[in-house]
Image (cartoon, grey):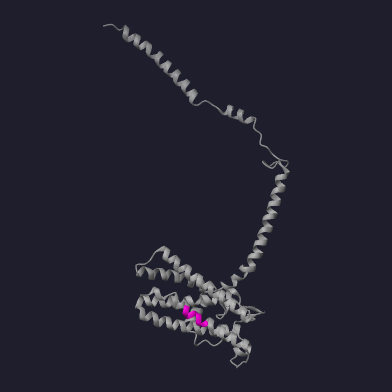
Amino acid sequence: MDYSADQSGFRQQPNILARNSSMDASDASQLFEDTSGARHGSQAGYKPQTGDHGFPGFSDPMSNLAMAYGSSLATQGKELMDKNLDRFIPISKLKYYFAVDTVYVGKKLGLLVFPYMHENWEVNYQQDIPVAPRFDVNAPDLYIPTMGFITYILVAGLALGTQNKFSPELLGVQASSAFVWLVMEVLAVLLSLYLVTVNTDLTTIDLLAFAGYKYVGMIVGVVLGLLFGRLVYYLSLLWCCAAIFVFMIRTLRLKLLSESAAEGRLVRGTRNQLRMYLTMAIAAAQPVFMYWLTFHLVR
């Protein structure tokens, strides 16, 4: 047996292992080469541009002047916008009309549906300022009209769905139609007050609140009509129409008529008669709108 090949083979194996180890060492040195020195070297020449105060990007004094001028101009524009906006829409006064609580809402809803037993309709004042609605059920508010309008749109969508007529476009038409009629009603009342030259403390928001109270009766009529049929709709709507008519007469007569007329005494004069006719016209318009906006929702 020739052992030279085996011996040579065994003699050559350490060389192969040594060569492989040297290759692995060279690969490892390439894979884990320390490049921190190059990175630091590349960044050694970088120096951020700073201004006089040491903050980057503000080396030019004109930029500071431009920023100060822009801030002052934005402040003046905001003040001017708030002043002009408050002239047409008194945002600061809207908090008063939303100052309600659960007790007030419950009493006001009962007053809108059953106004016949209520006796005192005067708004209470404190130092020539009307108290918040949550302290006086006779005070106008915007919470009930706003929620009533939204609920009316939702009920209208439900009613259209029961008739297989529901669509987002038709619901949008219903909402826009109700809103347009509301705006036209308020504008008509404002024009009538201007033509009759009535000196009253009623504001546009007050008229919007009074005009929005009719949505309560509309919701009651449509919901009962959907549950019990068209006959119940007519009966319930008739009750709510009579209730809102009484409510508007007793509320607005203290605002539009003179003190003697509000107390029930006979007052002669064309101007007082015009005020009385205007009060009755505003109250009579509420049932007309209530029927016009709900009769097609109940089949």
Prevailing SS of the magenta stretch: helix
Q: Which residue is drawn at 38% across and 71% down?
A: 159
Position of the N terminus, as image quadrant, is top left
**Whether residue 121 can be seen here:** no
Q: Give the range drawn in magenta.
A: 283-288
Position of the C terminus, as image quadrant, is bottom left
Whole-percent x, y for residue 208 in the image: 55, 74
Q: Which residue is drawn at 42% across and 66% down?
A: 170
Whole-percent x, y for residue 190 in the image: 59, 76
Residue 176 belongs to the span the image colors magenta:
no
**Whether residue 174 can be seen here:** yes
250, above or below 206, in the image: below
**Could you tell whether 126 is left or right of 102 in the image?**
right
Q: Nearer the viewer, residue 144 or 24?
A: 144
Q: Residue at x 38, y 77 (%)?
A: 225
Q: Which residue is drawn at 44% across and 21% down?
A: 24
Q: Which residue lies furthest to the left in this view?
A: 1
